[in-house]
Image (spheres, helix red, strand yellow):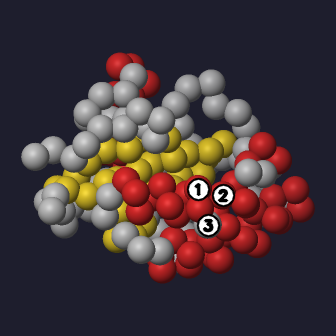
Amino acid sequence: MSSYHLAQLNIATMKYPAEAPEMADFTNNLERINALADQSPGFIWRLQTEEGDATAIDFFGPDILVNMSVWLDGESLHDYVYRTSHARIMSRRKEWFERFEDSYTVLWWIPEGHIPTLEEANEKLELLRANGPTAEAFTFKQGFPAPQ
């Protein structure tokens, strides 16, 4: 068994203010989708404020939503992202979020028990953008095994 867990960061630039009617289907489903993550097999932790989500965190800018979480392994994260109602709601992301020209999702391995910071996550995203997928910062499409 690995002594590492998988961390993920994804960011999205909103097309409209969070309270705009155009964002209602997204914001109205946020609590349900976050609860689904919290209850998913392999889920360990997610970034959130006292309100239970991360929409008020503006580390990357005032219009950029951030999602960061830690999972037991890649299979657990993959199952949540692509095999739950999360996939159905995020299939509509073009309605709510601008298209990124660069990477907006990054995965990396962390020692078991470590909680990543936004600074660490940003470093990983920048590493991915600069070098493409490596064992230090990678994507779903091109993953790397946990360190031995």
Which residue is labeled 3 in the image? 84
Above or below residue 22? Residue 41 is below
Looking at the picture, does residue 23 appear above or below residue 133? below
* Residue 133 image offset from top left, x and y in percent: 37, 28
Determine whether the residue tagged by mark 2 lies in a helix, strand or loop: helix
Disc 2 from disc 3: Cα separation: 6 Å
User: Which residue in the structure is indicated by mark 2?
Assistant: 87
Q: CA distance from mark 3 to mark 1?
A: 6 Å
Q: Residues within 10 Å of mark 3 (few under 14, many from 20)?
A: some
CB-based contact (under 8 Å), mark 3 and mark 1: yes
Could you tell whether 41 is left or right of 15 in the image?
A: left
| Any part of residue 116 in sight | yes
Q: Position of residue 23 (x, y in %)?
A: 81, 58
Q: Is residue 61 above or below residue 127?
A: below
Task: Give the image location of residue 95, x and y in percent.
Answer: 82, 47
Label 1 SS: helix
Percent across and percent down for residue 146 are 22, 47
Residue at the spot 26% in from the left edge and 58% down from the top edge? 5
Q: Are marks 2 and 3 in contact (CB under 8 Å)?
A: yes
State the residue in front, 115 or 81. Answer: 81
Tag shown at residue 55: none
Q: Which residue is mark 1?
A: 82
Q: Relative to 126, is 84 above or below?
A: below
In which quarter of the view is residue 98 placed? Answer: top right
Marks 1 and 2: in contact by CB < 8 Å? yes
Please report the residue visible at 48 percent of the width from the left and 55 percent of the height from the top.
78
Q: Is residue 32 left or right of residue 40?
A: right
Task: Tell me which amino acid carries mark 1.
Answer: Tyr
**Quick one: 63 or 13, which is closer to the camera?**
13
| First-in-chain label (2 vs 1) | 1
